[in-house]
Amino acid sequence: MVELRTDRLTLRRFRPSDVDDALAYRGDPEFARYLPHVPQPFTRSHAEEFVAINIADRYTWAVVVGGRVIGTTNLEVEDEIAMLGYALARTHWGRGLATEAARTVLGWAFPALALERIWASTDVDNARSRRVLAKLGMRHEDTRGREVFYGLPRAAWYSAPIAAPR
Ligand SMILES: CC(C)(COP(=O)(O)OP(=O)(O)OC[C@H]1O[C@@H](n2cnc3c(N)ncnc32)[C@H](O)[C@@H]1OP(=O)(O)O)[C@@H](O)C(=O)NCCC(=O)NCCS
């Protein structure tokens, strides 16, 4: 896995020593509100399992600030298409960090993985997440039940003003 950096963030592979940090931010019902796969209460054994799975995943980055893991940015890659995901500790919301992390991952992934398209989905009521997707230049393409789908073709990524220096 490639390590990525921004002015504020380091994006790196998970390590066994990240269990305490994962436990601290994932055991928050507000964090997990739109993440049905995150059990509440979130126990140490959930945190250990989460870290072990992510250590083995080539495209899940631990988002690190001040030496602490505060969340994840991940891609699920299938051929030339990747699904984007992100989740940060509530204490770090509202500072542009999820957008910064995701933009950095996309800036690496489009050329490195020769991607043709990125997509993402979220709950229709997850306004913060929808705003992140809009800030990345992603377009709302479909709604199925409570789930909204966004897409970003390669050409749009490279032509959008947002694709300027990152
Ligand atoms: C969604 C999430 C990643 C956003 O992280 P973040 O670092 O706060 O995101 P950013 O700061 O980059 O952008 C958030 C945007 O939402 C806006 N926002 C905040 N509260 C909002 C609200 N109630 N309604 C609408 N927009 C809101 C912010 O103003 C900001 O937009 P702006 O930059 O135009 O001002 C974070 O809330 C999170 O981790 N939530 C829990 C996990 C989750 O739901 N992940 C997404 C699964 S698809």
Image: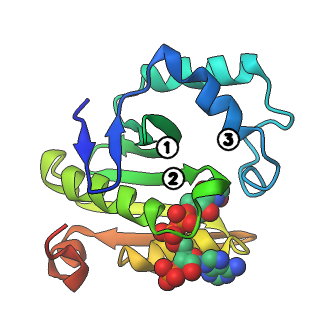
Q: Position of residue 67 (x, y in %)?
A: 43, 34
**92 up-or-down from 70: above or below:** below
Residue 25 is labelled as: 3
Question: Is 91 placed above or below 18 here?
Answer: below
| Residue for point 37% across, 73% down | 136
Ligand 1 positioned in quadrant: bottom right
Ligand 1 under 8 Å from disc 2 Cβ: yes
Q: Looking at the image, which residue is at 21% across and 59% down? A: 107
Label 1 within 8 A of ligand 1 by Cβ? no
The answer to whether 56 appears left or right of 37 in the picture is: left
Q: Earlier in the sequence, mark 2 or mark 1?
A: 1
Q: Disc 2, disc 1: CB below 8 Å?
A: yes
- Can you tell which of label 3 and label 2 is closer to the viewer? 3
Q: Is residue 45 left or right of residue 78?
A: right
Q: Quadrant of the N terminus?
A: top left
Quadrant of the drawing holding the C terminus = bottom left
Choose mark 1 or mark 3, whichever is in front: 3
Tell me the residue that label 1 is attached to.
72
Residue, disc 2 = 86
Determine the image quadrant of residue 34.
bottom right
Provide the secondary structure element on which disc 3 rests. helix
Report how far apart the C-alphas of labels 1 and 3 lie in the structure: 11 Å
Distance CA(mark 3)–CA(mark 2)? 13 Å
- The image shows residue 133 at horizontal and vertical percentages of 47, 72
> Is residue 4 shown left or right of residue 82?
left
* Residue type marked 2: Tyr
Residue lying farthest front? 66
Task: Judge by depth and name the residue closer to the eye, 90 or 102.
Answer: 90
Residue 165 spot, x, y in % from top left: 14, 71
Question: Tag 2 or tag 3, which sits nearer the N-term?
Answer: 3
Q: Residue furthest bottom?
A: 161
